[in-house]
Amino acid sequence: MLSGDLQVITVGAGLLGEAVDAQAVPRVGVDWRPPLPGTEAAIARVLADPRRAAANETAVDRLLSARPHLVTVRPAHEVLDLAPGAFLHAGPPIGWKRASGPLRGALIGAMLYEGAAGDAREAERMLAAGDVRLSPCHHHRTVGPMAGVVSRSMWMLEVHDAEHGGTAYCSLNEGLGKVLRYGAYGPEVLKRLQWMGDVLGPVLRAALAVSGPLDLRALMAQALQMGDELHNRNRAATSLLLRELAPAIVDAAPERAAEVLRFIHGNDHFFLNAGMAACKVSADAARNVPGSSMVVAMARNGTDFGIQVSGLGDRWFTGPAGVPDGLYLGAYGPADANPDIGDSTITETGGVGGFAMAASPAIVRFVGGDVAEATAATRSMYEITLAEHPAYQIPGLGFRGTPVGIDVTLVARTGLLPVVNTGIAGRVAGTGQVGAGLVNPPVEAFTTALAALAEEAPENTA
């Protein structure tokens, strides 16, 4: 047994491996972690479900084969059946009492924008009294960044899946800083929203009527090759979108073309909302596959972080939203930060964003960390996903497809949580953006979803 050369294998704790390295002894490191505490029985039950393998194959195939196209821009009241006094918000369901500062600020601003209240105090009184109906964006085939508030008069990007026939919506991007989605509602915010409703939305609709549908999957794939990760860095994607739309904007609305093109040019995040709708319509194609343990939505409302799973319908599994760890603007710091908020984690659900940071070395200048950590974050996500995206590829990893298709079972077995990069909203209503950083979802969202999958598994799996 000892006649050959000895080989050292280290498992788990890094301290032992570091000691061996210090002695210049060759070793093989195994990055093993125990499953999440208390999940062993549920993991065994779900893994024994005879439907699981085929169900996950079906779900991930639907997600990967989706072909999202931006087809038009329309007012929310035309496409979402929003009655007066009804507003959508990001994340799982929540009421005014538990709503975070940014969500409260965005709701106040939306009411002022719609003329539903004369001032902020009246809006707050109406919201506290329950005179306003709130519903999650995800319940209406919609996603909204940060607070994600959608009202009747806002214009929505309409994205159609040419493969499976689904449709998803997202509002137009306002830019950074003091904007409604970060909970700001001052005069400059309302003035911008009014211009977006009067000018930007109609011009984009007219331009898309001239250009025809835009292939967002192809555009996103190209943007990844150009250094975007498509959540917090959308500079290349916005430039590509602008190049596609600019001639049609000039043709469709020559008298408004300069101001519209100038607005998009000055907003590097403009593409984010289109990318979110593309990921939403792709993930929705994978919903409602019995036995599938694949995540089809991750979303936050500033208080709760929730996930939805393909095999569990529209049920939400939640835990407390964490405060991102990142870089802050100006004099702001962690004490000013609200817990994580927004539907933009649909990008990570679709295999980009935090899952594609290895494609975007420059992102670390915005969210913190260094390039090696960004690459390591992407590599770790292959351990909890079911596939690699055939179109979304990472040059720095030899054009390997991004990790996609988060599996609740793999999360529980490895103890690894999805990596999310995100903006940070000020916790006080009206503040706006205070920074950007990285955050992980709460463990509880995945363990409760796993338990539900175990309960749904057939009794007799022999």
Image (tube, helix red, strand yellow):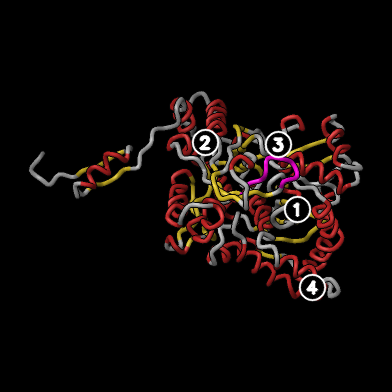
Image-based side of 115 in relation to 52, left or right:
right
Of the two numbered discs 4 and 2 on the same chain, state the one appearing first in sequence. 2
Of the two numbered discs 2 and 1 on the same chain, state the one appearing first in sequence. 2
Q: Nearer the viewer, residue 383 or 122?
A: 122
Instruction: Where is residue 25? Give x, y as percent.
Output: 19, 48
Instruction: Where is residue 238? Give x, y as percent.
Output: 66, 65
- In this orientation, does residue 62 appear? no
The residue at which mark 2 appears reads as 51
Q: Residue at x 47, y 34 (%)?
A: 412
Residue type (three-letter) at the residue carrying disc 2: Arg
Q: CA distance from mark 4 to mark 2?
A: 55 Å
The residue at which mark 1 appears reads as 171
Q: CA distance from mark 3 to mark 2?
A: 40 Å
Whether label 4 touches label 1, CB < 8 Å? no
Q: Residue at x 60, y 66 (%)?
A: 236
Residue extent of the magenta highlight? 423-431
**The label number, if any, that marks residue 258 in the structure image:** 4
Residue type (three-letter) at the residue carrying disc 4: Ala
Q: Residue at x 71, y 40 (%)?
A: 428
The residue at which mark 3 appears reads as 100
Look at the numbered disc 3 and give the secondary structure of its residue.
Answer: loop
